[in-house]
Image: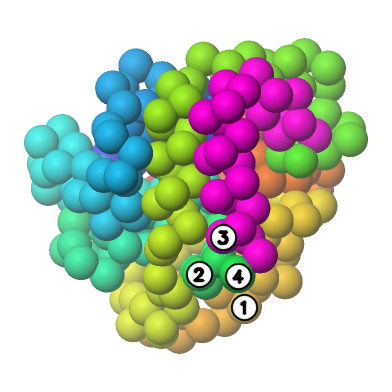
Amino acid sequence: MSQVVVLIHAFPVDRTMWEPVATFLRDAGHTVLMPDLPGFGNSHAWPVENYSIEALADHIYTIIMQQGDGQAIVGGCSIGGYILLDLLRRYPQCVQGAIFCDTHAGADSPETVAARMTMIEEVKKMGIIPLSKTMPEKMLSPQASPHLQAQVATAITRQSSYGIMGLQYAMAKRSDQSSLLPQLTMPILFIVGEDDPTTPPAVMRTMADQCTKAPAAELVVIPAARHLAVLERPDLVGPALVSFAQNI
């Protein structure tokens, strides 16, 4: 059965991170929507103070209602997962199945909040070029090709500085959504890079174990991948998404 699949990208890249796995879904007959979050890709930035996980979830909800006939399988990577959690809390009726990629349900620690505020100040002063030089190695495994590293670096440089600051602001002030997991009743897929230091497999295993009402809560660990497992190993992630979508 053909499904509408909405995929929410990670920070600090854009919708193009999903293109390699979207090909698998399209070839299987599914409709794929890959929106750019405000200030990323071709989407206009909001004022920084307007960014919040709730506002971003409202943005995705509008897309589902307007382009997905009111329901979709929704996947989110990193901040995309935070947005998906809020969507599930406030608009569960629009999510047929949930896909969490390299993300977690908790709020930031005080240290992480401080680091986000520091990044905002650095982007204000120096722009986003320094970020493009440091982030790829945090998001990609050492096995990633120079071409892929350059691709991620280039993707970062084309984003709006307001978008970069806005997403950091939204992530810093988000709330813990862990209590939602035991309430979820739709099929759920968790995907994580084996070597992801930000959201390691153990963290996502805990998330999957908390989804006690879900008819299926599968965890797929992707070898030789870090935080952007979706982009590093589309050969493994793509078929996993297709298999999940086919069973809904």
Residue at the (80%, 34%) spot, across then down: 137
Earlier in the chain: of badge 2 and badge 3, it is 2
Badge 4 is on which residue? Answer: 109
Residue at the (33%, 69%) spot, across then down: 186
Badge 2 marks a residue whose secondary structure is loop
The span picked out in magenta is: 111-137
Q: CA distance from mark 4 to mark 1?
A: 18 Å
Above or below, 147 against 109 in this view is above
Do the residues bearing badges 4 and 3 touch, measured as CB atoms within 8 Å?
yes
Q: CA distance from mark 1 to mark 2?
A: 15 Å
Badge 2 is on which residue? Answer: 107
Badge 3 is on which residue? Answer: 113
> As shown in the figure, which amino acid type bears the numbered disc 4?
Ser
**Quadrant of res 67:** top left
> As shown in the figure, which amino acid type bears the numbered disc 3?
Val
Q: Looking at this view, is 91 or 73 the one in front?
A: 91
Q: CA distance from mark 2 to mark 3?
A: 9 Å
Residue at the (34%, 39%) spot, across then down: 48
Do the residues bearing badges 2 and 4 touch, measured as CB atoms within 8 Å?
yes
Q: Which mark is on residue 215?
A: none
Badge 1 is on which residue? Answer: 206
Tag 1: Cα neighbours inside 10 Å, few (<14), some, or many (≥20)? few
